[in-house]
Amino acid sequence: MILLWLIVVLVGGGLLAWLAARVHPLLCRWISLAAVLVDLALAFIEAFRHVSSGNAGMNTWFEQVDWSWIPQFGIHFHLALDGLSLLLVLLTLVLGVVSVVISWSANIKALGFYHLNLLWILAGILGVFLSLDLFLFYFSWELMLIPMYFLIAIWGGERRTYAAVKFFLFTQLSGLLMLIAILALYFAHYHATGVYTFQYTALLGTPLSPHMAMWIMLGFFIAFAVKLPMFPFHTWLPDACAEASTATNVILAGLLATTAGYGMIRFLFPMFPGAFRTFAPVAMTLAVLTILYGAILAFSQTNLMRLLAYASISHLGFVLLGIFSGSAIALQGAVMTLIAHGISTGALFVVAGSIEDRTHTREIGVMGGLWDTAPRLSGAGLFFALASLGLPGLGDFVGEFLILLGTYRSHIAMTVVAACGVLAATFYALRFVQLAFQGPNLRPWRLPDLALREGLTLGAMMVVLLWLGLYPQPVFHTFAQAANHLPALWR
Amino acid sequence: MTASDVLALLPLLLIAGSSVAVLIAAAVGRNHAVAFGLSLAGLAASFCSVFFVPATQVTALLDIDGYALFFFGLISAASFAVALLAYGYLRNRDIDKEEFYVLLLVATLGAMILAASSHFASFFLGLEVLSIALYALIAYFGDRPLPVEAGIKYLVLAASSAAFLLFGIALIYADLGTMDFARIEHILAANPNPNLTLLLPGVALVVTGIGFKLALVPFHMWTPDVYQGAPAPVTAFVATVSKGGMFALLLRYFAQSGINRFAPALLVFTIIAIASMLAGNLLALLQSNVKRILAYSSIAHMGYLMVALEVGGAIGASAVVFYLVAYFIMTLGAFAVVTVLSAEHRDADQMEDYRGLFWRRPVLALIFTAMLLSLAGIPMTAGFLGKFYIIAAGAAAGSWALILILVIASTIGLFYYLRIVVILYQQPGDANQPLPLRMPAAGLVLAALTVILVWLGVYPSSMLQAIHTAIGSLL
C-alpha cells in the first residue's frame, strides 16, 4: 500500500498546492514541500525496512500492489518495488525536494499551477519506476510529458514554445512506437498462451521469433533512446534545457534520462535477450558516439544551459555503454552513473540557475571572475564540475570507472574511445569553471553570494555525492537484490 | 406492427413527437424557453427509454437491436448537449429561435434512423431526414454571408452525393435483387465468387455517398467551409451526431452484409483510411482558423476509425464504437468551448480569440486543453484509450503498416493541437477580445463532458462492457 501512497501523496499534494495558491503563495510552497518530504520519508522507510533488515535478495519484490484495472484487456494496476526501483525512487524524491526548494524565492507566475505540474511530473516518474504492468508503464511514461510540456511552455525562456513542442513531438512519436511494440508483445503472448495480459512477469518468457523479437525490442529501444537522449535523437534536450527554468532543468536532465536508463535495464535485456545481444554492438557504437559527440559539443557551447545539457548527454552515453556491454560490473556502474549523474547534473543546473538569477544571463562569455564576488557559489560550481569530470572520491567517478572496467573485458576498442570521453569532460568542465568563475572580474559583477536556502540544498547534494563516491556499497547492495532476478548475462 | 414494435420504436417516436410538440407550441405562441424545454424533455425521455426498450427487428427496415439502442443513447445525449449549447448561443440574438430546435430534433431523428437501418431504403430515408434538416441548420443565420455559403455548399454536395448513393443502391439491387443487408449477406455467402460487374460499381457509389457524409478523403472538400460557416453548436452537431449516425450505419453494413470481403473493396478502404489520416492532419497544419483546424482534424479522426473498421471482427468493431464515444465527447467539448467564447456577431474561431485564455479564464482553458489533448490521444483522457484500442485492433490483425501510418499521422496531428494549447497559455495580447455571451447551460455541458472524458480515460471498464454487449447483438 505504501507504493500507492507514494503516488497519491504527490497527486493530492499537487491539487492542494494549486488550491492553496489562491489563499497564500507561501502556503502553496509549504504544501508542495511537505508532500515531497512526506514521500521521501516514506521511501526511506521502505529502504530501511527492506535493505538494512537483511532480507534483500530473498524476495523478488519488496512490496506489491496488484489490482485489476481494465479486465477486458487484462490490464492491472500493478505497482512493485525492488532494489533498482527503490534507488531511483529515492533519487527522484531527492531531486524533487531540490526542485521545490530552488523554486522558493523565484517570482513565478501562476504559482499554484506551477507546483501542480512539478508534483505531477514527479508522480508520473514514480509511476514509471514502479509500474509492473506494461500498460500502466506506458500510461505513466506518456503522463510525464504533459506537466513537463507545461513547465517548459509556460515558465520557459524566449523560445519556449519551440522547445516545448519539439520536446513533446520527439517523445510522443517515440512513445507511440513503444506502444506498438508493447501491443505486438501483448498479442504475441496471447497467441502463445491464450491469455491477454500486460503483466511484466508474464510477458518475460514470451516465445518470439528472432525477427519479431528484434522489431519489438527496437520499438522499446527507440523510446528509451530518445528520452535518454542518445545521439542522433538528442537534439530536443539542449533546446529544452536552454529555455526551461532551473527546477525544470533539474528534472529534465536529472530524472527523465533516468527513466530511460531504467527502462533499458528493466525491459530490454530481460525480455529480449537474443535480440539484445545481436543489437548490442550497434547500441554500444551509438553510445560511444554519444559520449564523444556530447563532450565535443559541450566544449563549444556559449550558453551555459546548453553546455550542461551536452555534458549530460555525454555522461548518459556511458550509461548506455554500461547497459549494453553485457557485464555485471558495467551494469552496476550504469546504475551508479544514473544516480550520480542525476545529483551532479541537477546540482550544476542549480548553480547555473543561481548564476542566472544574479547576472540575468546564460552566456558564459559574459560571466567571469565571479569567484571574487560570490566565492561560495563559485566553490559549489567548482565542486560539481569536478564531480562531473569524474574526480575520484565522488559518485560520478565510481560509476564511470565501473562502466569502463566492465566494458574493457569484452570490448577493448570501445573502452579506449569512451575513455577519451572522460578526458574530454575535463576540458569542458574546466572551461566552464575558468570562464565563469575565474579570470578577471571585468564587468565588474557585484553579486550576492549563496543564500542559506541555496547553500543548504547544494551542501546536501555535495554530501550525497561524497557518500556515493566514498562508500557506494549500499547502492550496490540494494541493486544486487534486483540484479538477482535479472538474467544470467548480467551476473 | 405489434405493440412491442411500437415500444421498440419509442426512442424514435419520442424525438419525432417532441419535434411536433415544439412546432405546435411555436404556433400557439413563440417562446424560446418553452421550445428549449420541450426539446430537452424529448431528448432526455428518448435517452432514458433506451434502457428498457425491448430489442427487436421492426419490419425489414429497422433493426432495433442492442447496437442501435446504444447509438440511440449516444446520439440523444449528444443532441441534448447541443441543445444546451444552442440555448445560450441563441438566447440574445434577434432571430426566430424555435425552429432551430425543430430542425435539431428532426436531424437527430435522421441520425437515429441511420444507426438502426438494416435496409437500403431506411438508410436513404434516414440520410435525407438528417441532411435536409442540416441544410437549414447550417444556414440558420440567413443574414450572414458565411453560414449561407456553407449551407449552399452543403446542399449542393450532399444532394449530389445522395444521387450517387441512390445509383449505387440501384446497381446493387439490380444485381442481387434485395436491399436488405442480411439478405445480401446470405446471397454472397451462398455464392462466394459473384459477378462483380454491377456489384463493385454499386459498392463504390454507396461508399461515395457514405464517404461524403463522413468527410473522408477524397470526399472531404466541404468540411472546412461548413465547419467554419455553420454556427458553433451546429458545427458540433455536424461533427458528432451526423458523422456518428453514419459511422454506426457503416459498421452495421460491413458487419451484416459482408460486402467488405472483396479484396478490391478492402484496398479502396485502406487507401481512403491512409489518405484521410495523412491529408487531414497535414492540411490542418496549414490552417489558422480554429474551426477549420478542428474540421481537418475530424477528417483525420474518421481516418483512424476506418483503420479499426478495416480490421473488423469483434475487436475492430468495439474499437470503432469506443473511439466514436470518445470522439463525441472530445469534439463536443472542443466546440462547446468555441461556443462559450463566441460573441454576438461572430464565433470565436480566430487564434487570437484564444491567446492567453489561461490567464483570463483558467478553468475554461484547462478544459479546452483536456479536450485537445484527448483529440491528440494523451493519457488520462478518453481519446488516449480510443487510440490505444484502435492500435490494439490493428496489432491484433497484424496491420503493422496501417498502425505505423496512424502513429505518424497522429504525431503530425499533435503539432497543431499543441499550437492551440500553446496560444492558450501565452501572455494575453492587447487586442480587443470579443465580449463573450453568458451561457451557464454551456458551462454545465463543459463540466459534464470533462468529467466523462477523464472518467473514460481512467476507468473505462463499464463503458467497455456496454460496448461489448452492444457489439454482441451486431456480430
Image (cartoon, rainbow, N blue to C red):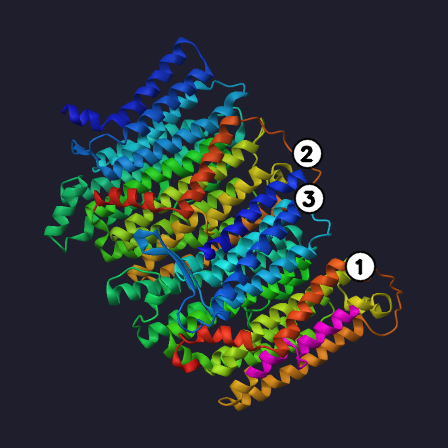
What residue did someone put label 1 on? Answer: A358
The image quadrant where one finds the C terminus of chain A is bottom left
Chain ID, mark 2:
B
Q: Secondary structure at mark 3?
A: helix
Picture quadrant where residue B465 is located: top left
Task: Name the kind of residue labelled 2 in the image.
Answer: Asn
Chain ID, mark 3:
A
Q: Report crowding for label 2: few under 14, some 14 to 19, many 20 or more residues within 10 A (C-alpha).
A: few
> In the image shown, does B389 or A37 lie closer to the viewer?
A37
B266 relative to A255 in the view: left or right: left
Task: Name the kind of residue labelled 1 in the image.
Answer: Arg
Residue A25's mark? Answer: 3
Secondary structure mostly seen in the magenta stretch:
helix
Query: In 3D space, how far apart are the residues under numbered discs 1 and 2 (Cα atoms)?
Result: 37 Å
Q: Earlier in the sequence, mark 1 or mark 3?
A: 3
Residue at position x 47%, y 52% from top? B378
The nearer-to-camera label among 1 and 3 is: 3
Verify CB contact (< 8 Å) between mark 1 and mark 2: no
